[in-house]
Amino acid sequence: MPSKLKTLITSEEIDSAIQRLASEIRSEYRRKNPLLIGILKGSFVFMADLVRRLDMPLEVDFVRLSSYGSGTESSGKIRISGKLNLQVEGRHIIVVEDIIDTGLTTAHFLRYIRSKRPASAALCALTEKPSRRKVDVKIDYLGFTVPDRFIVGYGIDWNEKYRNLPDICYIE
């Protein structure tokens, strides 16, 4: 894969979007003590910044899902490793994702969460790539819509590389 990176979304634009998303979530969940579930590994940077801006009672948990392996195309086969440590039933759940691409992984996990009978289940995604969607996924809180390019940075990787970039870039 070529290693020439082009900035798609700057760290300043990301910061502004997170501030907006936090404001939207606070207005809906301020008195609900939501459980935010981050999808590892990609969401960890986004979720950390989002949680710091929420300034309200909440809890955090993580789960690891994968459909990529070391390639740039989703395999369509979803792997779940790790399990939730906190109670979901009766809770207000916000699933936090770095990117919604085909939607297969997210739809699979949302079905799993809804089977646990939460009070509500919402999805917050930093980015989405609707041109690649294979299943319908409702995104309740969205940062950015991105073109059909392989993006990296701000927690999003290619083969475990580029997570540390402060901007979201695409590989040319």
Image (cartoon, rainbow, N blue to C red):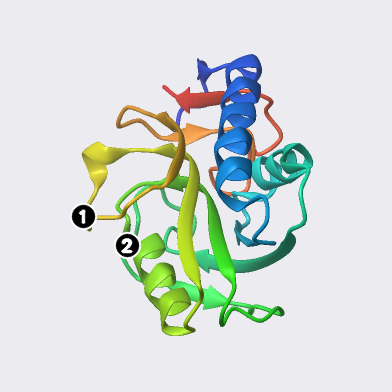
For badge 2, the amino acid type reads Leu
**Which residue sits at x=63%, y=55%?**
41
Q: Name the residue under label 2.
A: 104
Residue farthest along the front direction in this orientation? 31
State the quadrant of the C terminus.
top left
In front of the other: 160 or 148? 148
Tell me the element at label 2.
Answer: helix
Q: Name the residue under label 1.
A: 134
Residue 59, image x, y percentages:
74, 63
Please report contact status of discs 1 and 2: CB closer than 8 Å, yes or no: yes
**Which residue sits at x=69%, y=25%?**
166
Q: Crowdedness of circle 2 by 10 Å Cα count: few (<14), some, many (20+)?
A: many
On residue 66, the disc is none
C-alpha gap between disc 1 and disc 2: 7 Å
Q: Crowdedness of circle 1 by 10 Å Cα count: few (<14), some, many (20+)?
A: few
In terms of image quadrants, where is residue 81? bottom right
**Which residue sits at x=23%, y=55%?**
136
Residue 117, image x, y percentages:
47, 82
- Residue 84 in sight here: yes
Picture layout, residue 75 above or below residue 115: above
In terms of image quadrants, where is residue 148? top left
For badge 1, the amino acid type reads Lys
Upstream in sequence: badge 1 or badge 2: 2
**Is 119 left, or right, of 101 in this rendering?**
right
**Which residue sits at x=65%, y=15%?**
12
Residue 14, image x, y percentages:
60, 24
State the quadrant of the N terminus.
top left
Tell me the element at label 1.
Answer: loop
Residue 47, image x, y percentages:
67, 47
Picture layout, residue 91 above or below residue 8: below
- Residue 156 in sight here: no
